[in-house]
């Protein structure tokens, strides 16, 4: 092939081939560089978990393994504990206000006598976890697994238990009011001696053999007759107008 009297080498490339080469090799690099320019500030702001950091306010232990430890008495307010494993860990007398325990593992963890105001426990796994005598005002337990957990004597005003599995959970002696248990599983949960000062939403909650002996159910919002029939009460249980006590409470002889 000749151009203006010159013979082009056999290895020369045409303009179309060169363009294709640039598109395939150079263009992606340019796009990547531009993307970094726009996202650089965001990447710098990412906070990575440091599982070896000391227990302090605002600590980031997201996804860390903190099981079988003694962490009692620490100030962990505003901490990030999303998906952290605290199984069988001692967190008694800790301050964990406004901390985030979303999807954390709290199996058999001890969180007694702690302050956990506005703390998020959404979708946490808290089988047999103990929260006795703790301040859990406005805490969020939405969709959490709380089978056999213990909230005896705790302040639960404003706490959200909607769609949680709170079967066999202890609420006896707890200070309650403005709580949401809608569509939660509260089968065999114990509300005896609970001090209820405000409405409790219980719409759609599964109340099989839930212990309501001595409880004023007139402020349980959304309570239906089918829930009353399968629950447990006695002569001191108070029902709202339109509801009636069954001929025999399921737990009457237990």
Image: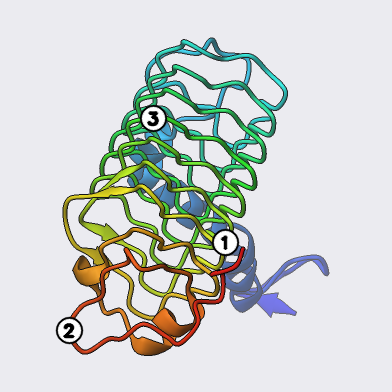
| Residue 241 badge | 2
Whole-number angstrom distance, CA of label 1 to CA of label 2: 27 Å
Q: At 38% across and 30% down in the image, what residue appears?
A: 134
Task: Tell me the element at label 1.
Answer: loop
Q: Residue 43 location, x and y as percent?
A: 43, 38
Q: What secondary structure is found at the residue carrying circle 3?
A: loop
Q: Quadrant of the C terminus?
A: bottom right
- Circle 3 packing at 10 Å, graded few (<14), some (14-19), many (20+), is many
User: Residue drawn at (64%, 66%), measured in percent from left and top?
Assistant: 21
At mark 2, the secondary structure is: loop
Comparing 137 with 225, the one in front is 225
The circle on residue 113 is none
- x then y, percent, for residue 80: 45, 32
Image coloring type: rainbow
Q: Quadrant of residue 57?
A: top left
Residue at 42% in and 81% down: 227
Q: Position of residue 219 (x, y in %)?
A: 19, 67
| Crowding at mark 2 (Cα within 10 Å: few <14, some 14-19, many 20+) | few
- Up-down: is 117 above or below 222? above
For the residues labelled 1 and 2, say whether their Cβ atoms are less than 8 Å apart: no
Residue to which mark 1 is pinned: 167
Residue 163 image-quadrant placement: bottom left
For discs 1 and 2, the disc positioned in front in the rendered view: 2
Mark earlier in primary sequence (3, 2):
3
Residue name at image x 35 percent, y 25 percent: 115
Q: Which residue is mark 3?
A: 134
């Amino acid at each position: 092939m000749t151009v203006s009297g010159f013979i082009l080498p056999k290895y020369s490339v045409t303009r179309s081939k060169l363009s294709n080469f640039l598109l395939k090799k150079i263009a992606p690099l340019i796009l990547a560089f531009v993307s970094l320019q726009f996202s650089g500030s965001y990447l710098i702001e990412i906070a990575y978990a440091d599982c070896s950091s000391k227990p302090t306010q605002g600590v980031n232990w997201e996804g860390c393994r903190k099981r079988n430890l003694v962490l009692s008495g620490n100030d962990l307010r505003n901490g990030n504990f999303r998906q952290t494993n605290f199984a069988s860990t001692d967190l008694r007398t800790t301050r964990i206000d406004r901390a985030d325990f979303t999807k954390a593992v709290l199996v058999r963890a001890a969180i007694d006598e702690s302050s956990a105001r506005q703390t998020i426990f959404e979708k946490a796994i808290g089988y047999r976890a103990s929260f006795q005598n703790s301040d859990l005002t406005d805490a969020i337990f939405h969709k959490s697994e709380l089978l056999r957990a213990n909230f005896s004597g705790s302040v639960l005003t404003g706490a959200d238990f909607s769609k949680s599995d709170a079967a066999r959970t202890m609420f006896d002696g707890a200070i309650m009011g403005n709580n949401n248990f809608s569509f939660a599983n509260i089968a065999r949960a114990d509300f005896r001696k609970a001090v209820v000062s405000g409405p409790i939403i219980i719409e759609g909650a599964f109340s099989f053999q839930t212990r309501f002996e001595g409880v004023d159910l007139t402020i349980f919002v959304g309570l239906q007759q089918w829930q009353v029939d399968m629950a447990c009460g006695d002569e001191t249980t108070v029902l709202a107008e339109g509801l009636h006590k069954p001929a025999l409470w399921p737990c009457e002889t237990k």
